[in-house]
Image (tube, rainbow, N blue to C red):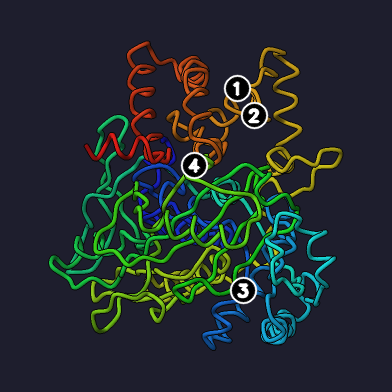
Amino acid sequence: MKRLEDQVVWDIIVIGGGATGLGVAVDAASRGYSTLLLEQSDFAKGTSSRSTKLVHGGVRYLAQGNIKLVYDALRERGILMKNAPHIVKKQAFVIPCYSLWDKIKYLTGLKLYDWLSGRFSFGRSKYISKNKMTGIMPGIRQEKLVGGIEYYDGQFDDARLAINLAETSAANGGVTLNYFKVNQLLKENNKICGVIATDIETGKPYHIQSKTVINATGVFVDDILCLDTPGKKPIVQPSQGVHLVFDKSFLNSEAALMIPETADGRVLFAVPWHNHVLVGTTDTPLNKHTLEPRALEAEIDFILKTVRQYFSKAITRKDVLSVFAGLRPLAAPQKETDSTKEISRDHKLMVSPSGLITITGGKWTTYRQMAEVTVNKAIEVGHLKKADCKTAALPIHGSATVTGNSDYSITVYGSDYKKIQALANEDHSLNNKIIEGFPYTWANAIWAVRHEMARTVEDVLARRLRLLFLDAAAALDAAPVVADLMAGELEKDASWKKEQLESFKILAANYLLKTDQKMAIHKN
């Protein structure tokens, strides 16, 4: 906090600690600009921890003819894997083919996908026979199956990348603060010159001067724009995406399943992730936004109905271990529509008459590119001394591969893994598991508090570890242990622990899918 109070005027203030805001903070700090990022909740609390966990060009965008978006994303995919090899990994995908036409159509499209990836290719797509298809994915429905198409894309852990970006910004001189809410924009002669923000934990307000202010708040960009111009017409149309998580036995494969055409003309993925299977996503237009969106019953039913057509193993609501929803900040359409198919997935950069810079849209894969153009604009608007972008070749915190361990929940820490091991070696009790059946130890929780700015039980169980997203019931069981460990680290009392556990219980209920019996009781 001393750095915040000592800095008289910042070069750049970034509002928003999701993928885009953190990317901007890394870019700006690495160029040498004094950079402050303020996040009203926890890093990646919103959309940026709720993705399908893919670093990809976007096969369906290719089908829509958006060649440039796909080309840029494939290039960024390659850069991200080079800069964060501990988080991003190559993932095989298979598309089941139930007709000869399927085989021709999908292979042709994916060959174009291969070509666009160029020197950043993850591997060439190819046709595979029915026998090989069932060997790769024995859980696939075999009736009328003629074969499949195999291709390669990237997979990652979104919240883990977010916290590593915050650490990368800090390593380059930036300051990143969670639980700091911007309440007002400061102006001088109708031009933005800073913000008034409140430390949520202490309630203390801060008047912070800056040469430029960047609004990178995702689905909340309109809220900040209204601080600048009250009553301003929204520029974002929120779109909700829902994911269901199952035991790994339902996919029974190291490869991911790509369902290229669902009943509503979209695509669906079933991806192995942290020893589970993540299935999604939906695309439902909404008229409101919230930090904790809830899955709609229609979205849940849609996913279950679709995957039942492809999984040979029977699947029911009772098999869902966790359900979560995220909101995408899509550019608002010029005319009203009930569909988000044609709404732009590309980013949008704009500068208000006051000088407020707003960046929205896009996706995780292209966060670095979005950050680069945003900081370039900030240099122009704020009359900052010019400096070249460095992030194309800038290693992200933790950038190292872990050898001797194949558990992604461990290797995703990269170079921090050995430091966590060292922490546990100092106090062997820290080797205790937070909960049986998962690799997370007490040392992971302690590390999250000491080095990763975790402030609540939710921060640890939802985003530093991914337990809430993998198995909500297990997360509830683990919460008391985490609360005890955090209370010791943060010097909190019994009332804090009680409040944390009650809050987490309410939160976790949204991730638990009601069974048919419970739904009937609830409706009555």
Q: Is residue 466 above or below residue 428?
A: below
Distance from label 2 to label 3 (Cα)?
A: 32 Å
Residue 322: assigned label = 4
- At label 4, which amino acid type do we have? Ser
Residue at 56% of width from left, 57% of height from top?
Answer: 308
**Foreground residue among 416 and 96:** 96
Residue at 58% of width from left, 86% of height from top?
Answer: 67
- The answer to the question of whether label 1 and label 3 lie on touching residues, with beta carbons closer than 8 A, is no
Residue 424 x/y as whole percent: 71, 20
- The answer to the question of whether label 3 and label 4 lie on touching residues, with beta carbons closer than 8 A, is no
Q: Residues within 10 Å of mark 1 (few under 14, many from 20)?
A: many
- At label 2, which amino acid type do we have? Tyr
Q: Which residue is mark 1?
A: 434
Mark positioned earlier in the residue sequence (4 or 2): 4
Q: Which residue is mark 3?
A: 57
Q: Residues within 10 Å of mark 4 (few under 14, many from 20)?
A: many
Residue at 39% of width from left, 69% of height from top?
Answer: 359
Q: Nearer the viewer, mark 4 or mark 2?
A: 4
Q: Quadrant of the N terminus?
A: top left
Task: Identify the secondary structure beneath mark 4.
Answer: strand
- The answer to the question of whether label 1 and label 2 lie on touching residues, with beta carbons closer than 8 A, is yes
Residue 412 x/y as whole percent: 69, 44
Task: Identify the secondary structure beneath mark 1.
Answer: loop
**Foreground residue among 302 and 309:** 309
Mark positioned earlier in the residue sequence (3 or 4): 3
- At label 1, which amino acid type do we have? Ile
Task: Identify the secondary structure beneath mark 2.
Answer: loop
Is residue 264 in sight in this rendering? Answer: yes
